[in-house]
Amino acid sequence: MNNELRELYQEVIIEHSRSPRHFHAMADCDCRAEGYNPLCGDRITVFIKKSGDHVKEISFQGSGCAISQASASLMTEAVIGQSMSTVGDLFSRFHSAMMTPLEQSISQYELGKLQVLAGVREFPMRIKCATLAWHALKNALSDEPHEVDSEDD
Ligand code: ZN
């Protein structure tokens, strides 16, 4: 990644962490799940309202490092209005991209705006910060609500 791109990506991450999108609780949500990343202390709660097979509304609340909050904010933008199968596909692609060694390209995952998190792979300790919100999302959408322990990375 060249320096110009790296700086641009960092700016987007900082901007999202300072002004997270869809950052609020949702009292009348259909499902929710909490995520905690003990490595960094990040906490995220994801709230979802469904409409048929689609994510009608999504919001989150939480605290933690800039990467965890920016990733959650970017996630809400990526999945709102999407079908469950698209959301599942996005989760798989994002997760696979984050697990790809830095020296390998992740362009095949077609991450769109989520691409700004590509640089997180330079810091393996921070990968769980980036994937935390997605694990919470996946758990919220699964049938049985439960805490995310983020141990499956
Ligand atoms: Zn973190």
Image (cartoon, helix red, strand yellow):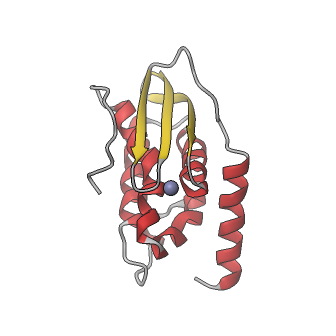
Q: Residue at x 37, y 39 (%)?
A: 138
Quick check: 131 left or right of 64? left
Q: Quadrant of the C terminus?
A: bottom left
The picture places residue 24, in percent across and down from the top left corner, at: 63, 29
Q: Nearer the viewer, residue 64 or 103?
A: 64
Q: Is residue 87 above or below residue 14?
A: above
Q: Which residue does the image show at 47% across and 45% down from the upper left?
A: 133
- Rendering quarter of residue 76: top right
Residue 54 drawn at (x, y percent): 47, 30
Residue at 70% over, 75% down: 7
From the top left corner, tell me how far across and down residue 61 is, in percent: 57, 34
Percent x, y for residue 80? 56, 37
Q: Does residue 123 lie above or below 131 as drawn?
A: below
- 21 vs 153, left or right, is right
Q: In which quadrant of the rendered image does the N terminus lie?
A: bottom right
Say which residue appears at 36% left-offset and 63% top-offset.
96
Kindly indicate the quadrant of the structure image that contains residue 62.
top right
> Camera-side residue: 92 or 147?
147
The foreground one among 51 and 150 is: 150
